[in-house]
Image (cartoon, rainbow, N blue to C red):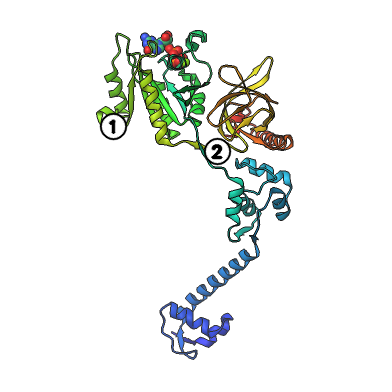
Amino acid sequence: MPKIRIYKIAEQFGIPTSELIDILKDLGAEVKNHMSSIDDDLVELIKEEIDYRRKRAEELQKKKERTITIDAPVTLRDAAKLFNQDLDDIIIRLADWNIIFDTRNPLPPLALEKLAREQGWEIEWKEDVKKKILEAISFEPQPRPPVVTILGHVDHGKTTLLDAIRKSRVAESELGGITQKIGAYQIEINGQKITFIDTPGHEAFTSMRARGAQVTDIAVLVVAADDGVMPQTEEAIQHARAADVPIIVAINKIDKPGANPDRVKQQLAERGLVPEEWGGETICVNISALQKKGIAELLEMILLQAELLELKARKEGHAVGTTIESRIDRGKGPVATVIVQEGTLRVGDYFVAGTTWGKVRSLFNDLGKPMKEAEPSTPVEVVGFTDLPPAGTKLMVTESEKIARIIAERRAEIAREKNLKTPERELISLEELFA
Ligand code: GTP
Ligand code: MG
């Protein structure tokens, strides 16, 4: 096999002999000096290594050229200038990412990084700029009430249970005794608030139950002791599991002659929900919603579970929430029930919700009483939408009408374009587009 002298190879590749000798050493080849010679097949290996190093050096150089050093907080306006972008485009991107912003405040660090990355830039932070920004824009999270969703098979007693808790009589007045929509209520016991969401058990309402599970901290699964685990019981278990929400089981109708709580427990255990008293982790409470028995114990279990979850949310700043139902009201126009999740929603706030927007004209609690503001975990009826928002839409308060409108209009535009491009599915719902 022919041998080639090292200095010749170095010349050929255009690198200093010393660098070549380093490479050879790294490869474990023995080299004495630049007059040494090496095998032909080693040359191929060396070439590869040199190519690789060159490419890396180039990439590093490129990266350096595409790095912006941030040495002071950057507002949205600054960012627009920095990336030579339209302010409205940036606003829309932030809304897409569900990032809460205020054009007057510094941009959250991650938002700035994401914006930069989209433009092919890397961000390098100077010392404690990041810390400074976070101090300026973040709020200390405060404890908040749990949001509890009542799930279960049709007629197993969900609404009656809620009536017992609220001391109201909704179940009786319902059309045909079947819950048609999601209802949200807040109660207070011993100074502790709990938000409840009622869902229909009928099989036709799958998406509604899924929506309920989305904003939920704890699921209460109602199972009638005379009927046992049924298809929508199983479906409810799946929703709660998919949302990673703890389940408390209320075994209802224990007053009925055919009631068999142990059989229910057996059926639950077979589905992975092993009751605590059987050595498992699932809390089961025997109740009679009709006779108001076991209600206090169930509430106690809910509060205990809530305490374990240490639920918190920021109270200050722009509100964020989710619509759980919406309807057109003859007098009020489009209204939606919203569960506030972060911040405080106030009368007068501008907001965007999916492709619609509005200004909070009035807020009502679950008893129809007007409210001035709604803190995290509060269910509230919001009046002031320009259009009907589909249930399950995220609502976000914006600092101005203009920003709310820009975001909503751009989203509607995108939705229309998407619709045009998929003629085979004309009936795509807005809910699907913004899921
Ligand atoms: P959907 O919303 O349609 O899924 O039903 P639901 O789960 O809300 O059931 P609802 O509360 O409407 O109750 C259905 C029927 O069961 C009603 O006639 C209630 O009076 C009855 N019921 C509810 N709880 C109890 C109970 O603890 N004991 C007895 N005996 N009947 C009950
Ligand atoms: Mg009901």
Q: Taking the image as four quarters, which one is ligand 1 found in?
A: top left
* Residue that mark 1 sits on: 280
**x%, y% of residue 214?**
50, 31
Secondary element at image label 1: loop
Give the mark nearer the N terminus: 2 vs 1: 1
How far apart marks 2 and 1 lie (CA) works out to: 34 Å
Q: Secondary structure at mark 2?
A: loop
Residue 107, how many percent across, how many down?
A: 64, 48
Which residue lies most toward the front here? 190
51 lies above or below 375: below
For label 2, count other residues whose C-alpha is less than 10 Å away and answer few (under 14), some (14-19) or many (20+).
Answer: many
- Percent coordinates x, y for residue 199 in the rendering: 48, 21
Which residue is more in the foreground, 378 or 355? 378
User: Is residue 53 among the parts visible in the rendering?
Assistant: yes
Q: Residues within 10 Å of mark 1 (few under 14, many from 20)?
A: few
Labelled disc at residue 397: none
Q: Pick the quarter of the image with the C terminus.
A: top right
Give the image location of residue 36, x and y in percent: 46, 89
Which residue type does callout 2 highlight? Arg
> In the rendered structure, which amino acid carries the disc numbered 1?
Gly
Question: Relative to residue 4, is residue 93 drawn left or right?
Answer: right
Instruction: Name above or below for residue 422 compared with residue 122.
Output: above
- Select label 2 or label 1 by which is in front: 2
Check the picture and name the quadrant holding the N terminus. bottom left
Q: For the point 59% across and 67% down, which residue is it?
A: 60
In this view, the residue farthest toward the left is 278
Q: Is residue 72 above or below residue 411?
A: below
The image quadrant that residue 62 belongs to is: bottom right
Write down the quadrant of residue 337 in the picture: top right
Name the residue tied to disc 2.
Answer: 314
Q: Residue at x 52, y 81 (%)?
A: 19
